[in-house]
Amino acid sequence: MFSSPEASACRVLPVHAAGHPRPVPPFDAEPTTGDVIVTTHRVTYSDRLKVFIGPHEDVDSFLRPLRRMDGHQRYSLDLTVLPEPVPATEVTTTVSSARGDLALGCAGSADAMTLQLRTTIDHVTRRFTLGLPGGRLGLPTVYLPHGDEDTYVYPEEVFTADNAVEIFRDFFHAGAVPAGLQQREILD
């Protein structure tokens, strides 16, 4: 459902957000010249295009595609936290294809999408569908197509693009989803 290591397109955008950039977190690589652009996250669009962004970026510009998702051609967005900050000039194929231990993804359309949190602790990956508080009785009944796949979720687990932007923004800045969301573990 979400980005795969086989995704081949990769693009690094070493641009500064308008205004004053926020402080860049420390990292182990030595700067080579002047201002070093650091990437801390990978954004993957519909399992194809990958963009690397860092704390100096305006994350909202990378979340605009959420509002254009149609469930077919444009059907997912995955925001993965890199294991450690990497200078933009040192993003390699290995960094580009690494699954990542912490990610927030969505799939569906701008009007109805599901959000999933993926976390790996002690080499065990766990996935959770996010939702608003409420009961989860019986089987999920809301059908959400995305690409060549489909997912069923509970009504409390359906978000719009506008709802998702806020959750992605919080995840980007804090590394966690808002506390008010319920997490239902996906058992494969």
Image (cartoon, rainbow, N blue to C red):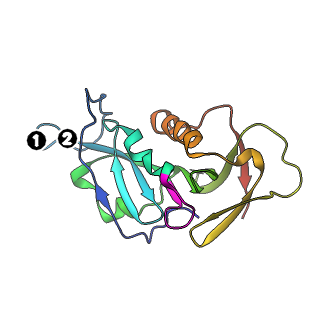
Q: Position of residue 173 (x, y in %)?
A: 45, 34
Q: Is residue 47 above or below residue 78?
A: below
Image quadrant containing the N terminus: bottom right
Amino acid type of the residue tagged 1 in the rendering: Thr
Specify start and end residues of the magenta stretch as a single range: 68-77
Q: Nearer the viewer, residue 47 or 125?
A: 47
Identity of the residue drawn at 57% across and 43% down:
164
Identity of the residue drawn at 46% across and 39% down:
172
Left or right: 100, with 145 as reference point: left
Amino acid type of the residue tagged 2 in the rendering: Val
Asked if residue 175 is among those painted magenta in the image, a careful observer would answer no
Q: Position of residue 99 (x, y in %)?
A: 48, 60
- Mark identifier at residue 125: none
Q: Is residue 152 above or below residue 61?
A: below
The prevailing secondary structure element of the residues shown in magenta is: loop
Image quadrant containing the C terminus: bottom right
Disc 2 target residue: 36
Mark 2 element type: loop
Do the CB atoms of the residues marked 1 and 2 lie less than 8 Å apart?
yes
Q: Residues within 10 Å of mark 1 (few under 14, many from 20)?
A: few
Q: Nearer the viewer, residue 165 or 5?
A: 165
Q: Is residue 131 above or below residue 106?
A: above
Disc 1 target residue: 33
Left or right: 58, with 19 as reference point: right
